[in-house]
Image (cartoon, rainbow, N blue to C red):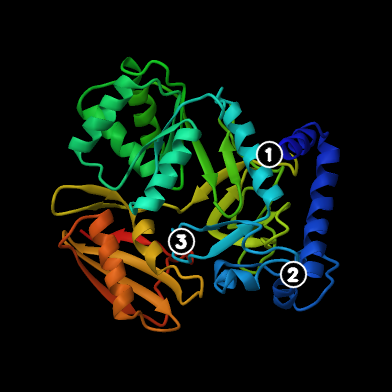
Amino acid sequence: MKESQAEFNAILCLSPEEHEQFIEQKKIEILEYHLQNNSYYRHFVGKSEIENWNDVPVMTKKDFQKPLTERLSRGFTEKTVFKNKTSGSSGDPFIFAKDKYAHAITWASIIYRFGWYGIDFNKSYQARFYGIPLDFIGYTKERIKDFLGQRYRFTIFDLSDAVLEKVLQKFKKKKFDYINGYTSSIVLFAKFLQKKNIILTDFCPTLKVCMVTSEMLFKEDKVLMEKQFGIPVVNEYGASELDLIAFQNLDGEWQVNAETLFVEILDENNQSVPNGTEGKVVITSLYNKAHPFIRYDIGDIGILDERSTLDHPILKKLIGRTNDIAVLPSGKKSPGLTFYYVTKSIIEDDGNVKEFIIRQTKIDAFEIDYVSEKELMATQIDKIKQAIDLYLEPNLNFTFYRKESLQRTARGKLKQFQSLI
């Protein structure tokens, strides 16, 4: 961390001209590194040298749906990297890796941006609205990490009024400095406070700021949260396999990370579009040597502001990344991201399940469409049903349909969860 923070701080001190040179140099370095040291990437590209950056092929989530060991660069093993799963919120889940230095400089980036709002990761106490594994080992591990990381986690699998009342009582008793978590979960908490005519800082005056992530933040929801919490609400756009991609700065701009990432907006032919024009968000991780994320189509549509420069890009608009709320027979409400913890049980490293979407068709009935090389076995379906009972509630009816392909939106997006009721 000391080494990565020193390098990150040095990047921040670069002049605009020096920063442009830095970006161009890091792009070439990471491309040449993976062409020379990653047989998977070299095979994907089809040659060992590329002269023009625009000739570098665009990668998609589907390109990573094979065993991780086949995708690691020379000199790295699963034991020497940081390894994790993507949330699958786009419907295309996969396992990824970062080398330890890349993981460290990711945290340097996060620490720096949270620091804009007076948040110190070593001292500030976080009210965390995130999911948590419910098996004993996974649950215990996350609780220990929360304790060491100055966090108190509110699980988001049940957001009924009775549970939100307990959340409110925690805010009365604990001196939280900030709120961080899934947008939809925090919006539900704000609506609960609105119904009770409560301003959160009246009960927890130590609160400074709320950061929301993982889902679209609508303007009306931000206004509601800022009113009911009594603090600024900051919009974060990130991806676990990359870093913070964009983070709302003190001027209210969605400032793009130009220190550890190179973000492009491309058209359907993978050509750059002018600033102010809508296109695919395509990202290059400038530091990850263990695993290639080079011109990686993250699956979102966005627009860079016309004022953007290479050293100070601004994300004008992000299109997509919304999740519905599931309302269950008991009255329990669960955000769509809950289904990450359900579908996680079918995300195998062998890449069998390629895509999936979930629809709620009735109050107690759901359909799962999936694309796979092999049909799910009865034991796998039983495992999923057990996860459903654990994370949602018993007596829900799930029907599984294996498909050749899944229906996408006009923009080519898969919405992982959709409520039809």
Q: Tell me the kind of residue under disc 3.
A: Ser
Question: How would you rate the neighbour count of disc 1 (Cα within 10 Å): few for under 14, some for 14-19, many for 20 or more?
Answer: few
Label 1 close to label 3 by CB (< 8 Å): no
Looking at marks 2 and 3 on the same chain, the residue that comes earlier in the sequence is marked by: 2
User: Whole-percent x and y of residue 38?
Assistant: 74, 69
Q: Tell me the kind of residue under disc 1.
A: Arg
Q: Closer to the camera, 331 or 19?
A: 331
Instruction: Please name the residue that numbered disc 1 is placed on.
Output: 307
- Residue ID at (37%, 48%): 139
Between the C-alphas of marks 1 and 3, the distance is 29 Å
Q: Tell me the kind of residue under disc 2.
A: Asn
Between the C-alphas of marks 1 and 2, the distance is 37 Å
Res. 57 visible in picture: yes
Instruction: Please name the residue that numbered disc 2 is placed on.
Output: 38
Q: Which of the 4 image quarters holds residue 280?
A: bottom right
- Residue ID at (62%, 60%): 79
Instruction: Please name the residue that numbered disc 3 is placed on.
Output: 90
Looking at marks 1 and 3 on the same chain, the residue that comes earlier in the sequence is marked by: 3
88 left or right of 164 in image: right
Q: Nearer the viewer, mark 1 or mark 3?
A: 3
Res. 216 visible in picture: no
